[in-house]
Amino acid sequence: NAGVTQTPKFQVLKTGQSMTLQCAQDMNHEYMSWYRQDPGMGLRLIHYSVGAGITDQGEVPNGYNVSRSTTEDFPLRLLSAAPSQTSVYFCASSYTRWAETQYFGPGTRLLVL
Amino acid sequence: AQTVTQSQPEMSVQEAETVTLSCTYDTSESDYYLFWYKQPPSRQMILVIRQEAYKQQNATENRFSVNFQKAAKSFSLKISDSQLGDAAMYFCAYRTLNMKTSYDKVIFGPGTSLSVIP
């Protein structure tokens, strides 16, 4: 199993550009989520999904969209990038929403100029 | 609202010694999970240990153990026989366990940077 994979590893955007961060897992996990990590802070939940076709907002959802058309994939879209979205983004998955262990991807570092 | 506090931004320990990382949290819920995650320079988030709030027994995972004090809302991590590979950022995290709603919340503390001195 590859586990949780994220692409790209690093991306530079200009203010106003859009892009999609990819996340995929091959463990047949129902629950997937996106976090951002900023310097000096812990991870903050952006959006999550409890299964294909079901998504919900986390703590900091503004400026981000998600969809879950398949169990395996959970892309995160930045509609109009802003410098405040410069961060490291982590995708995570778990077998169910109530599973206590989440498996994290390696992260995507995003720089918005 | 739930909060997670790690009061030690940086800690250091001699190789083979024991170190304890502190974590306190605030919640009005009775059922929840607590975690310690390790983040090495590779930025990968690695689960170290977890504790279910309804369990009184402290979780143990090889050299890692926790001291869970539910009434005091304290969840410290003890690393025994510290190794060079233990050097990393450690995050304490809280996850709600409310099976009656679709609401989900995961709160991470700001982290403690652990250095291991040879």
Image: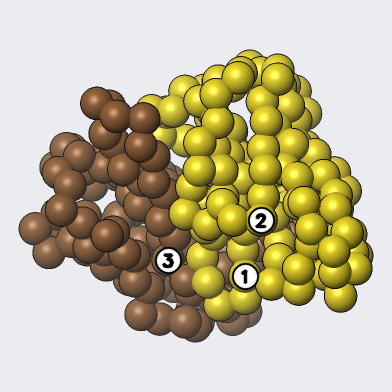
Chain colours: A yellow, B brown
Q: Which residue is mark 1?
A: A38
Nearer the observer, A113 or B71:
A113
Residue annotated with mark 2: A63
Look at 47% across and 82% down and name the residue there.
B9
Mark 2: which amino acid? Gly
User: Image quadrant of residue B51?
Assistant: top left
Element marked by disc 3: loop
Residue flagged by tag 1: what amino acid is it? Answer: Asp
Q: On screen, A83 above or below A13?
A: below
Q: Is residue A52 left or right of residue B97?
A: right
Q: Which residue is mark 3?
A: B109
Chain identity of mark 2? A
Residue lying at 51% horizontally and 25% vertically, measured from the top left? A50
Amino acid of disc 3: Gly
Marks 3 and 2, how far apart at CA: 23 Å
**Above or below: residue B104 compared with residue B44:** above
